[in-house]
């Protein structure tokens, strides 16, 4: 049976993320904890155009949870007793929340750039969120604590694997295009609204699409 501990290939650009969450937190007392997220892409299966159209998987949070009915990438908080690396946080959460098996971590995804080339993060566009100066993570202040959000583009063993959600955390999922994220609406089984948990999450997803085009 596959699980999140199946060997995960890692791109050489991600060497800084091969430390354990516990080790990073010991070096960075300013960070409360780490959230790992996974951006999974696939080519749209019903695409009739000549150019490939890519989609990414987003999950809709449960109505009873924080940020109710808003969308996010698969991800969650580091388990300091279990996760051997920061990348392993994203792989474990991806498997637990969807049953998709991570095969390779390709690159880290930050907040991207604004139209004039300046960092969106440095503009504090989302409640003081900013990119860290040392590591490619997004720093998000919540109730006086700083959370480090590390998101990776991840290749999975099979994008046709059935998505199995944890009902207490998420109530729907969707493969969405870059255009749908930009206009905050998509065509699916839900009401069509595509509001992310935060504007920072939306910017990370859009930056993921930009990076995916560079492969």
Image: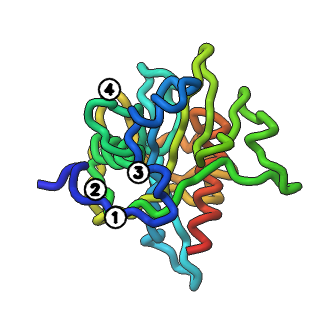
Where 204 falls versus 32 (above or below)?
Answer: below
Residue 119 image offset from top left, x and y in percent: 78, 48
Where 64 falls versus 40 (above or below)?
Answer: above
Q: Please indicate, yes or no, whether residue 159 appears anywhere in the rendered image.
A: no
Disc 1 is placed on an element classified as strand
Circle 3 or circle 2, nearest the eye: 3
Disc 4 is placed on an element classified as loop
- Quarter of the figure that contains the N terminus: bottom left
Give the class, few, some or many, for how many residues have Cα within 10 Å of label 4's Cα (few <14, many ≥20).
Answer: few
Query: Mark 1 or mark 4, which is nearer the start of the sequence?
Result: 1
In this rendered view, identify the residue nearer to me: 164 or 32. 32
Circle 4 or circle 2, nearest the eye: 2
Which residue is identified by label 1? Answer: 9
Circle 3 or circle 1, nearest the eye: 3
Where 191 falls versus 47 (above or below)?
Answer: above
Q: Residue at x 50, y 32 (%)?
A: 27
Q: CA distance from mark 1 to mark 2?
A: 12 Å
Query: Mark 1 or mark 3, which is nearer the start of the sequence?
Result: 1
Query: Mark 4 or mark 3, which is nearer the start of the sequence?
Result: 3
The label shown at residue 18 is: 3
Q: CA distance from mark 3 to mark 1?
A: 11 Å
Q: Is residue 167 left or right of residue 13?
A: left
Which residue is identified by label 4? Answer: 168
Disc 3 is placed on an element classified as loop
Circle 4 or circle 1, nearest the eye: 1
In this rendered view, identify the residue nearer to me: 68 or 108. 108
Circle 1 or circle 2, nearest the eye: 1
Residue 57 image offset from top left, x and y in percent: 45, 53
Q: Are marks 4 and 2 in contact (CB under 8 Å)?
A: no
Give the class, few, some or many, for how many residues have Cα within 10 Å of label 3's Cα (few <14, many ≥20).
Answer: few
Which residue is identified by label 2? Answer: 101
Q: CA distance from mark 4 to mark 2?
A: 21 Å
């Amino acid at each position: 049976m596959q699980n999140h501990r199946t060997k995960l290939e890692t791109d050489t650009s991600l060497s800084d993320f091969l430390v354990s969450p516990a080790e990073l937190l010991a070096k960075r007392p300013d960070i409360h904890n780490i959230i790992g997220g996974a951006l999974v892409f696939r080519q749209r299966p019903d695409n009739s155009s000549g150019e490939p159209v890519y989609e990414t998987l987003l999950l809709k949070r449960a109505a009873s949870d924080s940020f109710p009915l808003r969308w996010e990438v698969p991800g969650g908080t580091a388990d300091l007793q279990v996760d051997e690396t920061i990348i392993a946080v994203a792989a474990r959460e991806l498997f637990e929340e969807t049953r998709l098996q991570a095969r390779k971590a390709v690159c880290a995804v930050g907040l991207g750039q604004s139209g004039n080339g300046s960092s969106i993060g440095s503009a504090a566009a989302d409640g003081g969120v900013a990119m860290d100066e040392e590591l490619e993570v997004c720093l998000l202040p919540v109730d006086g604590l700083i959370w480090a959000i590390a998101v990776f583009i991840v290749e999975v063993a099979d994008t046709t694997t059935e998505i199995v959600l944890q009902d207490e955390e998420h109530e729907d999922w969707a493969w969405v295009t870059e255009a749908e994220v930009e206009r905050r609406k998509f065509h699916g089984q839900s009401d069509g609204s595509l509001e992310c948990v935060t504007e920072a999450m939306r910017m990370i997803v859009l930056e993921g699409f930009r990076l995916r085009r560079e492969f």
